[in-house]
Image: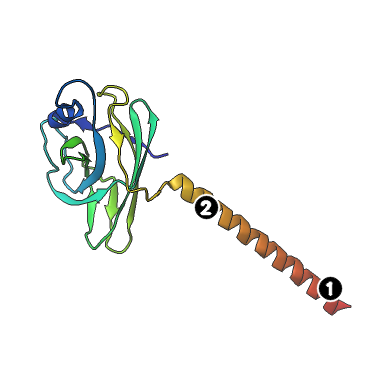
């Protein structure tokens, strides 16, 4: 897993968690906003200070009552240092914001940025936020398993070739 981000829950985000009838809790994170302005975030923010792109959540999984694992893929020609992240609800409300003067990552025009974020929402009631993703399954753990399988197959193939070379060399010596 990744390092958890502990964002500031926005005032509007907190209000959005409670449904219109105040009979329950409901919020769906659907997008991740990325920006380049590092600062100390505030609960009164309604959007990023310098948003550069907004991407759909690819996949999400609940780690525990207050922690959610999110993945997304930032692609395209835009280049910037990621110093602020907004977690956006289905209705466009920014639920939470994280920012730091030290960049989290660099979004290059040449290489897509795969984001794997663990979002800690300890300030909200347990299980009050869900994730709606595209189902793209960008889980680094899944990719790790696939890469390990391919690597094992390659190593097995190389071992067979080395054994074949030994046999050929042995035949040539005879």
Distance (Cα) linking label 1 and label 2: 37 Å
Q: Quadrant of the C terminus?
A: bottom right
Crowd around label 2: few <14 · some 14–19 · many ≥20 (10 Å): few
Marking on residue 96: none
Using the image as rendered, state which of residue 35 and residue 47 is in the foreground.
47
Q: Is residue 18 left or right of residue 149?
A: left
Position above or below: 35 against 96: below
Residue shown at 16% from the left, 41% from the top: 92
Q: Residue 11, image x and y in percent?
A: 13, 28
Using the image as rendered, state which of residue 10 and residue 16 is in the foreground.
16
Residue that numbered label 2 is attached to: 146
Residue that numbered label 1 is attached to: 170
Q: Residue 24, image x and y in percent?
A: 23, 22
Position above or below: 163 against 57: below
Using the image as rendered, state which of residue 61 and residue 111 is in the foreground.
61
Q: Name which quarter of the figure residue 61 lies in.
A: top left
As helix, strand or loop, the secondary structure at mark 1 comes to helix
As helix, strand or loop, the secondary structure at mark 2 comes to helix
Count of picture labels: 2
Dot 1 or dot 2, earlier in sequence: 2
- Are circles 1 and 2 on residues that touch, CB within 8 Å? no
Colour logic: rainbow
Q: Name which quarter of the figure residue 118 lies in.
A: top left
Residue shown at 11% from the left, 37% from the top: 46
Q: Residue 1, image x and y in percent?
A: 42, 39
Q: Nearer the viewer, mark 1 or mark 2?
A: 2
Crowd around label 1: few <14 · some 14–19 · many ≥20 (10 Å): few
């Amino acid at each position: 897993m990744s390092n958890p981000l502990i964002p500031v829950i926005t005032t509007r985000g907190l209000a959005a968690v409670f449904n219109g009838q105040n009979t329950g809790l409901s919020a769906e994170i659907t997008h991740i906003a990325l920006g380049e302005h590092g600062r100390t975030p505030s609960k009164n923010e309604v959007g990023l200070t310098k948003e550069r792109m907004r991407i759909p959540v690819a996949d999400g999984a609940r780690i525990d009552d207050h922690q959610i694992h999110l993945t997304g893929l930032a692609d395209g020609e835009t280049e910037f240092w990621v110093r602020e992240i907004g977690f956006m609800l289905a209705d466009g409300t920014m639920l939470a914001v994280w920012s730091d003067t030290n960049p989290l990552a660099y979004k290059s025009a040449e290489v897509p940025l795969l984001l794997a974020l663990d979002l800690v929402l300890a300030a909200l009631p347990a299980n009050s936020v869900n994730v709606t993703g595209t189902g793209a399954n960008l889980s680094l753990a899944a990719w790790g398993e696939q890469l390990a399988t391919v690597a094992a197959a390659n190593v097995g193939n190389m071992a067979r070739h080395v054994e074949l070379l030994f046999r050929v060399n042995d035949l040539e010596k005879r």
